[in-house]
């Protein structure tokens, strides 16, 4: 019988700007912050994993596992750095789970972070676009100034044509997430409200990203600094930590799958790897989509919010945009999706994103979300984290322990 794995603690920074906080400070803060949540020293951690995406190209820093090992108490322990594009955070969580299942330890920490802005909080859009572009297939970069917005603008156009969906239908996803972000103290876009008219009107900062394609500024996620960390443990590990099982969330199901990197030639509206990973997580947990009351998904662009609702199985194929538009993804809807504000309004610190999805979902199950965003009796939570052009997929299913 496979050991049960529990989330004992979650910690994150405010998403947005970390200013002059260095990468070593970020890593140390993520580790110690999670430990402080439950009042334990880092020395209780047996294993670790850390995910980041642009640390080499933007921060000129590699061997992040060594930075984690600099936290007193973590030296000489099994720690690794993982990279799976925007799914790096989710991959770090799975890495820790696998170590615990192998018996390498009973308590582990998963960290994800990204530092995308300089010490003054400013960003170099061209440099960031180039760095993120490395996570696409070389043959699909030519002629694209901002590679990933361009690739997903193509996906958005295909989705609209295939399912007779309008730009306004997809913009409704962004509007809902900006509403949620107003109540999330960790959200990057807190304090900024966007109406459906603003999200669909081409004026001011809202513009088409690629000429001839429907993607607009408000359809896009944010350039974000931030970090997030989870302490995971077996039942024996919880005992060592002094954390009661009833105060935890169980990672009841999890799976990862990867599609070919090149977008051309495959069905990106029904990504095989994403569906397989989500199905695998459900099967491991012994639940179905109808059991899911709350979810966090990878809406790097609004079209992914729609596709993700379909991958989750809460909306049928082609009905994802309508699920959002009709209010079924709100806090009081059939399945509340991205109550955190999602990547579009909460922010998208690439390496931290997958960790933050799981952490926020755990808060929902534990009743720790802000009152305005708390889903009543959510039952089961699901997360869907992707990397690249819907290439790498990491999915989890969480449930409250009794």
Image (spheres, rainbow, N blue to C red):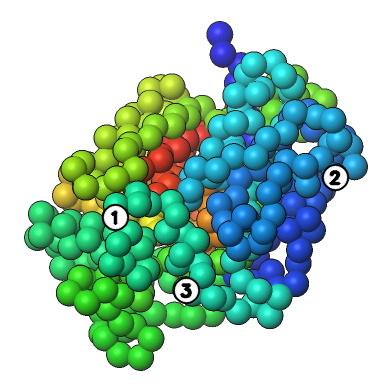
> In the orientation shown, which residue stands out farthest toward the bottom?
204
Are there few (<14), some (14-19), or many (20+) residues within 10 Å of tag 2?
some
Element under label 1? helix
- Which numbered disc, 2 or 1, marks the residue closer to the eye? 1
Which image quarter: residue 80?
A: top right
- Which numbered disc, 3 or 2, marks the residue closer to the eye? 3
Does any portion of residue 201 appear in the rendered image? yes
- Answer left or right for 203 relative to 95: left
Element under label 3? helix
From the image, tell me which residue sits under label 3.
Answer: 126
Sequence-wise, the earlier of marks 3 and 2 is 2
Question: Which mark, by number, is residue 140?
Answer: 1
Q: Residue 67 in the image: x percent, y percent?
A: 78, 47
Element under label 2? loop
Sequence-wise, the earlier of marks 1 and 3 is 3
Q: CA distance from mark 3 to mark 2?
A: 34 Å
From the image, tell me which residue sits under label 2.
Answer: 71
- Answer left or right for 157 relative to 224: left
């Amino acid at each position: 019988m496979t050991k049960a794995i529990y989330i004992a603690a979650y910690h994150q920074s405010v998403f947005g700007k970390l200013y002059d906080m260095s990468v070593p400070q970020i890593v140390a803060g993520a580790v110690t912050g999670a430990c402080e949540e439950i009042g334990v020293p880092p020395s209780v951690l047996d294993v670790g994993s850390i995910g980041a995406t642009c640390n080499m190209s933007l921060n000129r820093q590699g061997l992040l596992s060594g930075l984690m090992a600099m936290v007193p108490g973590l030296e000489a322990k099994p720690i690794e750095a993982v990279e799976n594009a925007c799914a790096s955070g989710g991959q770090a969580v799975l890495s820790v789970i696998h170590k615990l299942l192998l018996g390498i330890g009973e308590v582990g920490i998963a960290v994800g972070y990204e530092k995308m802005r300089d010490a003054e909080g400013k960003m170099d859009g061209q440099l960031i676009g180039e760095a993120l572009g490395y996570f696409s297939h070389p043959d699909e970069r030519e002629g694209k100034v901002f590679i990933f917005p361009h690739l997903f603008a193509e996906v958005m156009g295909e989705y609209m044509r295939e399912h007779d969906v309008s730009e306004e239908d997809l913009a409704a996803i962004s509007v809902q997430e900006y509403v949620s972000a107003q109540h999330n103290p960790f959200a990057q876009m807190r304090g900024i409200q966007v109406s459906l008219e603003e999200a669909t009107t081409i004026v001011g900062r809202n513009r088409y990203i690629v000429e001839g394609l429907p993607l607009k500024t408000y359809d896009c996620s944010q350039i974000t600094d931030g970090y997030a960390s989870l302490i995971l443990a077996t039942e024996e590990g919880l005992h060592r930590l002094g954390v009661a099982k009833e105060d935890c969330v169980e990672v009841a199901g999890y799976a990862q799958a990867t599609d070919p990197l090149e977008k051309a030639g495959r069905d990106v509206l029904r990504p095989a790897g994403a569906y397989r990973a989500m199905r695998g997580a459900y099967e491991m947990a012994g639940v179905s989509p109808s059991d899911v009351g709350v979810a966090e998904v990878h809406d790097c662009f609004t079209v992914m919010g729609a596709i993700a609702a379909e991958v989750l199985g809460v909306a049928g194929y082609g009905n994802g945009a309508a699920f959002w538009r009709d209010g079924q993804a709100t806090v009081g809807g059939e399945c509340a999706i991205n109550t955190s504000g999602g990547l579009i309004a909460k922010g998208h610190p690439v390496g931290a994103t997958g960790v933050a999805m799981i952490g926020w979902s755990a808060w929902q199950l534990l009743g720790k979300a802000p009152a305005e965003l708390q889903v009543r009796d959510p039952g089961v939570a699901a997360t869907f984290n992707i990397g690249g052009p819907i290439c790498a997929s990491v999915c989890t299913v969480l449930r409250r322990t009794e």
